[in-house]
Image (cartoon, coloured by chain):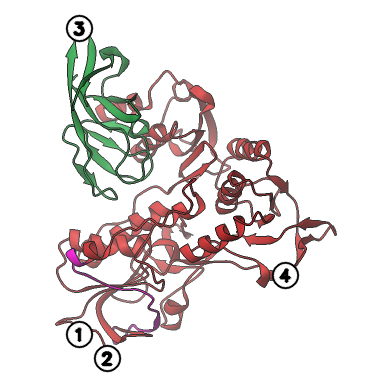
Chain colours: A green, B red
């Protein structure tokens, strides 16, 4: 059953940046786009189990910190090899200056 | 025995490591629709080598680059356990030990490299790490609790030392130099990695010359003995160039290639560990890294398929030892000015600026992936060729992204 979880303050993530968020033994990546929208994906790269929050956010993409893999964090789509598996994405919403994700 | 039968001669790739396999896929991505044959001398499906010296608690990871179904879906004919015995560049055909002859339209040499061996007495008693089989053998011996000596304090030797130490193995690293990691890693970072190993209980013998290996271990020229049950040599690799050489393709510690990865023979390309790249101004370089294998394989494939893309990517590598992650981009040189940026959790980045104040290289060390983002940004800053303010570069509160945005606006 999916549930809404309060993750962090909207200010905890800089524009065009990402943070790691761990909950219930799982790890997620929460993104703030250059347009100030928030997005959430699984926290680990689908290729090598590396934390995506250590990677570089450019526009709507996140680059894996290790292996050059690139994902669209809004859709989860794997844009560049090596990862061939898309990232799972989750709903995110803002309430009273807090970021909530549905996991 | 007869040859593979295709309606037309297609692309042949010799070597099914990271480079060759990436090239096979990149040919398809570039729109090439003729036959693609990928020839590997190992029995396994193509696999990733980096995990072999970075095993986790789960043991060695046999991480496949692709499986049979994926190769089939891409229309790639994979020949495992197959050696190319000769290359006739005039008739454009290669001979295989198992499948007769294979004519080619264009050929990629992605033959990789082979670990160098010690030439001293007993050198044949030592082990190396390059293939999955090598790794299996080493970790089997480690499971018996044997004492290990590693000759060579380069990246492979140091990563291996960290892995073995994690397994509770007694490890001594021996090197002729006075510190580990040679020229590839700046002094200050190499020292930190060294200290981290010492903290874990790895023993080091620097400034040491090996005289002989025997059943007791490694005997040094100062007459001391490093007692060991298993001796590993990790003293670098030699490029696999015999096929190219025998067929008259120009070689010199590598198969010589231009910026488009073309060799001296028409329709023959080379990429990855085996290729020596012409950098212009009489300089050449051969890179032995995972990313170089991928990038060169990719670009060679595009050019084989009719493209004309030169190599412009900066050399980059990473290493994981204990919790520490190291990344280096570009080629640091002694002539560069060093600027250090200290990040949180003891992470640090050393920037290397050329005489015009432009970023030429950057090296970072820190826990996990702490420096990854900044090294990637540094790579992009190197590409911009813009002079950078050294004060701002040293200031961790100034994001590297802001430098990039500034240069893009300018």
- Which labelled disc corresponds to residue B2? 2
| Label 3: element kind | loop
Q: Quadrant of residue A59?
A: top left
On screen, residue B225 above or below B408: below
Q: Position of residue B163 (x, y in %)?
A: 56, 48
On screen, residue A3 above or below B131: above
Q: Which residue is mark 1?
A: B5
Find the residue positioned furthest to the top: A96
On whether residue B175 falls in the magenta region, the answer is: no
Q: Position of residue A42 (x, y in %)?
A: 27, 33
Q: Are marks 2 and 4 in contact (CB under 8 Å)?
A: no
| Chain where mark 4 sits | B
**Residues at discs 1 and 4 both on one chain:** yes
Find the residue positioned furthest to the front: A1
Observer able to see residue B78: yes
**Which stretch appears magenta?**
B72-92
Say whether residue B195 is left or right of residue B111.
right
**Residues at discs 1 and 3 both on one chain:** no
Q: Quadrant of residue B279?
A: bottom left
- Which labelled disc corresponds to residue B220? none
| Chain where mark 3 sits | A
Q: Position of residue B277 (x, y in %)?
A: 42, 61
**Which part of the image, by quadrant, shows the N terminus of chain B?**
bottom left
Q: Are marks 1 and 4 in contact (CB under 8 Å)?
A: no
| x 42%, y 77%: residue | B244
Find the residue positioned furthest to the bottom: B1
**Residues at discs 2 and 3 both on one chain:** no
Q: Which residue is mark 4?
A: B120
**Which part of the image, by quadrant, shows the C terminus of chain B?**
top left
Q: Which residue is mark 3?
A: A96
| Chain where mark 1 sits | B
């Amino acid at each position: 059953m999916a549930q809404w979880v309060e993750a962090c303050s909207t200010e905890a993530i800089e524009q065009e940046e990402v943070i790691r968020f761990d909950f219930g033994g799982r790890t997620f990546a929460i993104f703030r786009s250059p347009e100030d929208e928030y997005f959430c994906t699984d926290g680990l790269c689908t290729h090598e189990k590396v934390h995506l929050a250590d990677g570089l956010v450019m526009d709507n993409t996140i680059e894996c910190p290790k292996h050059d893999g690139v994902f669209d964090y809004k859709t989860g789509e794997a844009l560049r090899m090596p990862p061939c598996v898309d990232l799972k994405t989750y709903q995110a919403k803002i309430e009273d200056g807090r970021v909530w994700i549905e996991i | 025995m007869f040859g593979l039968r295709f309606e037309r001669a297609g692309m042949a790739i010799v070597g099914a490591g990271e480079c060759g396999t990436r090239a096979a896929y990149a040919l398809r991505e570039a729109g090439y629709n003729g036959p693609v044959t990928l020839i590997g001398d190992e029995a396994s499906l193509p696999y990733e080598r980096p995990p072999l010296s970075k095993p986790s608690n789960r043991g060695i990871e046999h991480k496949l680059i692709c499986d049979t179904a994926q190769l089939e879906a891409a229309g790639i004919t994979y020949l495992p356990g197959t050696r190319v015995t000769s290359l006739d560049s005039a008739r454009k055909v290669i001979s295989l030990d198992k499948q007769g002859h294979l004519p080619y339209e264009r050929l990629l040499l992605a033959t990789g490299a082979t670990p160098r061996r010690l030439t001293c007495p007993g050198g044949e008693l030592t082990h190396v790490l390059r293939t999955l089989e090598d790794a299996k053998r080493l970790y089997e011996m480690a499971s018996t609790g044997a004492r290990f000596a590693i000759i060579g304090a380069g990246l492979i030797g140091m990563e291996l030392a960290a892995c073995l130490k994690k397994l509770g193995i007694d490890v001594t690293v021996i090197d002729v130099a006075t510190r580990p990691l040679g020229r590839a890693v700046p002094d200050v970072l190499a020292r930190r990695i060294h200290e981290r190993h010492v903290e874990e209980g790895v023993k080091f013998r620097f400034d040491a010359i090996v005289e002989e290996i025997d059943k007791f271990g490694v005997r040094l020229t100062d007459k001391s003995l490093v007692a060991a049950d298993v001796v590993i040599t990790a003293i670098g690799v030699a490029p696999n160039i015999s096929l190219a050489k025998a067929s008259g393709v120009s070689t010199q510690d590598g198969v010589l290639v231009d910026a488009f990865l073309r060799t001296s023979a028409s329709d023959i390309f080379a990429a990855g560990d085996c290729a020596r790249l012409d950098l212009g101004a009489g300089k050449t370089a051969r890179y032995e890294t995972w990313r170089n294998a991928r990038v060169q394989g990719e670009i060679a494939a595009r050019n084989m398929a009719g493209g004309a893309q030169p190599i412009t990517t900066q050399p980059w590598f990473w290493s994981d030892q204990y919790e520490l992650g190291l990344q280096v981009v570009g080629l640091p040189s002694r002539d560069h000015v060093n600027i250090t940026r200290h990040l949180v959790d003891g992470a640090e980045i050393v920037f290397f600026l050329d005489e015009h104040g432009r970023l030429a290289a950057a090296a970072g060390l820190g826990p996990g992936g702490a420096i990854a983002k900044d090294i990637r940004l540094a790579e992009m800053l190197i590409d911009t060729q813009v002079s950078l303010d050294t004060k701002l570069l040293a200031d961790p509160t100034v994001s590297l992204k802001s430098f990039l945005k500034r240069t893009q606006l300018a």
